Image: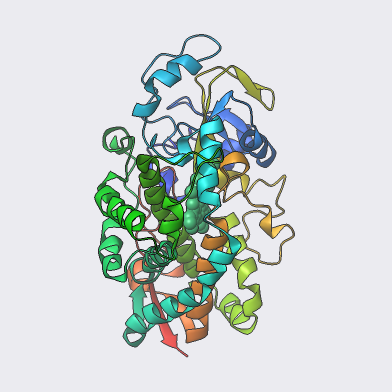
Amino acid sequence: MDKPLPDFFNDRAVIDDPADYFGRIRAICPVQREPYQGAYMVTGYDELTELLNRKDEGISSCLSVLGPIPPLPFEPHGDDIGAQLDEVRDRLPWSAHLVCFDGARHAEHRTLITSLLTYRRIRQNEQYLRSLADRLIDGFASEGQCNVVVRYAHATTTFAISDFMGIPESDRAVLLEAIGAPPSQIEGDAQAKVGPDPLAALKDLFDGYLRERLERPRDDLLTELVQSKFRNGEDVPFETLSNLARFLFGAGQDTTSHLISMAVRILAEDSDLQERLRVEPARIGDFIEEVLRFDPPVKAAYRLAVRDTELAGIPLPAGSVMTACLSAANRDPRRFENPDAFDIDRAGLRDHIAFSRGLHACPGAPLGRMEAGIAIERLLARTKRLELDETRHGPPESRHFRFVPTYTFRSLVDLHIKFEMA
Ligand code: HEM
């Protein structure tokens, strides 16, 4: 008999190897209730895209970041828990931030963000990203080794979003320290440590930036944010601007940082692929897409059934929590041929769901892709050879990596490489 499924939400074995867990639970059923928190794990590609694309009010994103932990602070009654949810909504973890909003409120706040993330503005950042990558590489070039997570990936994403938003250079090093890795979610941490506004520690600093722009507008994104209006012409309350600014700053950091780290990890294990991408840098975009499919930075997002509903014929009573397993859908063999192989030549490279789908699909995806693409392009161009530091990660037959203990994100604690400069 197969060994029992581990607890997705608490077991370190799943944090180290989510693909094994996802493969096993998908094989039982693409929409399967797990026994520990009672969450419905949606692991099939078609089932997940159906769920994420649903626009009806019966599905809520109010638990998007943490899912079933902590549990809803009420016992669901009947076939519609909308009124019960409204009473507690503002107390739920992350409730101050866009990713947990629903309906018309979500749409009007999301527009404020998407109107800032224009193609023109993102492209304007390209030159800065190249010089940033070179500056960071200069910082460790002479050492022949480095911890990529801290000195390259994480530094890239904090400096990149800071520059993108118009945050003063003098504050960026402090912010790099303040942001750190995503917090642990296991062993009670999700329950005890996360409130409605986990980004509150940045509030004074960011409110200061916004007030400055209200008094003295500049040519930057923060100024555009404070000058924005709702679609009906109404002013946006200061508290709303404050929450949006901090969420925009935080949302793309660890995610993009993990993408860069995972991309370097894959390259450091595959010298042929390194060589190929050095010769054909135009394929780096495809490489990044395959990293996003193969091991995405967000393993799962969560949804709540506000009304009785069903998915793929499985009834979901009001109050059910659904785990939208993005990593699992990306390796669904019904959608991707030979899904456990890393292959930049596969058909449908961009069909992955790493950026979610539907109403909450990531509006920062073009920026995240560009940051990662440039970071990899510069690292390959500046080095002749990259490899894993085996004193830290072990020999090929028994590699070991440390991941931050969270069930939502997939985040390397460290990644040590050795390299020879070109
Ligand atoms: C590789 C990098 C990134 C990945 C994998 C990623 C992934 C995601 C995912 C999966 C969601 C949707 C969660 C859900 O459906 O509940 C999301 C939402 C979001 N992301 Fe990203 N993201 C990345 C980079 C960025 C960047 C660079 C920014 C900002 C510049 C950003 C800003 C946002 C925002 C504002 C939302 C909320 C959208 C909404 O709720 O309507 N992300 N991201």
Residue extending furthest top? 78
Q: Is residue 1 above or below residue 329?
A: above
Percent position (x, y) of residue 309?
Answer: 62, 20
- Residue 415 in the image: state x and y as whole percent: 38, 66
Q: How many marks?
A: 0
Where does residue 289 sit, x and y in percent of width and height? 61, 61
Task: Relative to 227, say whether 237 is above or below.
Answer: above
Q: Is residue 232 above or below residue 256?
A: above
Q: Residue at x 38, y 31 (%)?
A: 69
Q: Position of residue 128 (x, y in %)?
A: 46, 75
Q: Is residue 19 visible?
A: no
The residue sitting at the bottom extreme is: 422
What's the coloring here? rainbow
Left or right? Give the position of 98 relative to 25: left
Query: Residue at left 60%, top 55%?
Result: 293
Q: Out of 243 and 223, give the one closest to the viewer.
A: 223
Tell me, yes or no, if residue 329 can be seen here: yes
Q: Residue at x 57, y 51 (%)?
A: 354
Residue at the outermost right position: 347
Residue 56 vs residue 280, the one in the foreground: 56
Residue at left 56%, top 11%? 79
Determine which quarter of the picture holds residue 146. Answer: bottom left
Where, by quadrant of the figure, is residue 387 drawn? bottom left
Quadrant position of the N terminus in the picture? top right
